Image (cartoon, rainbow, N blue to C red):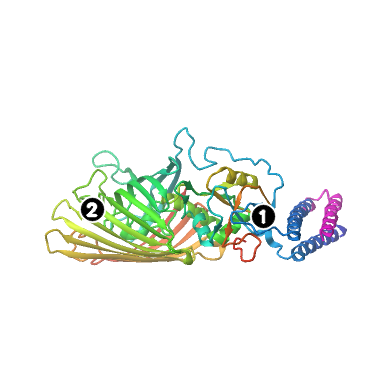
Amino acid sequence: MRYGLTLMCVSMLSFPARVYGQTANSAQSDEMIRALLDRIDRLEKRVAELESHSSAAAAPAPAPEPGATVAQLPAVAAQPEAAPIPVPAGPHAHSGMPDMGGPSPHIEGFGDFDFAATDQHNTHSGFSEGQFVLHLTSQLSSKVSFLGELSLTARPDAGTGSPPAPGFNVEVERSIIRFEENDYFKVSFGRYHTPINWWNMTYHHGEWLQTTISRPEMVQFGGSFLPVHFVGTLVEGAVPADGMNLNYNFGIGNGRSSVISRDGDWGDINNNRAWLIGLFSRPSGLYGLQFGGAVYRDLITPIAGQPYREWIQSAHLVWQKGNPELIAEVSNVTHEEVGGAVRANSQAWYVQAGYRLPWFDRLWKPYYRFEYIHIPEADQIFRTIPSLAGSTVGLRYDISRFVALKFEYRNIRRPDEPRVSGAFAQTSFTF
Amino acid sequence: MVRRTQVLSGSCALVLLALSLVFSLPGAPLSSDAVIIANPDVPVGDLSFNEVRRIFLGERQFWSSRLRIALLLRAPASRERDVMLKAVYEMSEAQFRQYWIGKVFRAEAASAPQMFYSDEEILGAVSAIPGSIAAVETTRIPKGLKVIRIEGRLPGEAGYRLR
């Protein structure tokens, strides 16, 4: 068999030479000859592989031990003499660690440009620049790493002068120094996106990462329903748990400031630390599924009025393999007046579904989201947040691997207000 | 006319040759298997398929407290990368890139898997980097590298899942 195959290959090798002699002046023939030669090269390689296999089959190797070298592997042949192998060069080629000269930060970025037109009174349609986000990571040792996220946001009042001119507002969104002992125990300090909401922890400020243009109202940047940021320390880890792949986190920090949409970057406003516990699972048997929940406890000291104890319970269920994409989250926020009888529960939830169409290179992804926020009148802390019911329908088109175009229509209804509809477009990217 | 006849006959012969190669040897499609290899200091020799997935997804990042896992992969358009994307990640190339950009962005991993453009490069890296693990498709793996069984099976054996 081996000799037969070899003879066939030899005869095939002589064939394109004849073809070439007759058609040397034809570009089409040249192309065909090159294709044939490529095919022959591949077949020769294939013959070599199969001959190696035949030899191995003729004299079966003993069953390899776990972790055996390839000399014992039935499918591949050992290299008779281990030739010196070139080792990739570069400071990060071996271990991903920086060389001894100092840290080597790695920078990535996200950006977006938007267009909006709504029927809301006192608003104008037009273009706007989204956030310009820089993301920095630096592996400081095999166990210590740093992550930073910096955003520049166009605002009508971020400039100088009186009244302030439009400009860009700079903010350190995340700044985290992390020590990793192993998979089970990682401890970090810094400013985080509070890990009590899946969206907040997954997409951060990377608009390109999320399917939609807009975030759910419950985790809007600058919003108040959930504390988006958290300054303090976090302990995290993961255990296989017999295929359940349980992940935990426990954090303690400053919690909300007196302006409840902000966190206590410059210090806590009281002597009561906020704390949180989160637990989620990514079961091996249902690859793509994640579900979990978290609790958060804080003492809110508003600028005016009585302090309130805050309890937040949240849960999420996510199927994120792309087809379909399904995200569902719910949060309940309890505010309890300290030394008083006022107690109120506010809820928010959303469900989002997307489906990447199988045609046109799978570049188009329609989606829909329904969201709902309920704020009772008794909730004095959230008295400025209106209840809401809204639908978002849209289409995402991935122009390239790192650039997306999104088109979105939103319809939002708030109590005692007219319905607001709007059309939005966005190009978002990573660089 | 003569040229076309010769080309056609050559093509037919090539097809016949390919078919004869494929069907003449039982278990022939061995080269389509991806082989999981590791640096010799990696303290495992057999992994479940789910554990392989956890490792290559970056969800498991340590072999032990003293040894971090270093993920290595071949560059796009290589056969073994295609096998890993299909069998382990269940993602397209675009989804794979987005997955790792997001993972690094969430601070869940320090970096995406290192990428190599040839067998020689990736084999050399596995030899040199403590804790490294890679998926390769090659018939010439140097002695000394550890071949990881998956569910107790090696490439070419029935039930091997990385193909």
Quarter occupied by the N terminus of chain A: bottom right
Please give the residue where the numbered disc 1 appears in the rendered image.
Answer: A72
Q: Quadrant of residue A159?
A: top left
Tell me which secondary structure the magenta stretch mostly adopts: helix
Judge whether A94 appears above or below A19 on screen. Answer: above
**Residue B144 x, y percent position in the rendering:** 62, 47
* Image: magenta residue range: A1-29
Residue B138 visible in the snapshot: no
Q: Residue at x 17, y 57 (%)?
A: A308
Q: CA distance from mark 1 to mark 2?
A: 65 Å
Tell me: B3 left or right of A255. right
User: Is A45 in front, or is B131?
Assistant: B131
Among numbered discs 1 and 2, the one appearing first in the sequence:
1
Tell me: A204 left or right of A359. left
The amino acid beneath tag 2 is Ile
Please give the residue where the numbered disc 2 appears in the rendered image.
Answer: A260
Q: Secondary structure at mark 1?
A: helix
Q: Secondary structure at mark 2?
A: loop
Q: Which label sits in the foreground, 1 or 2?
A: 1
Label 1 chain ID: A
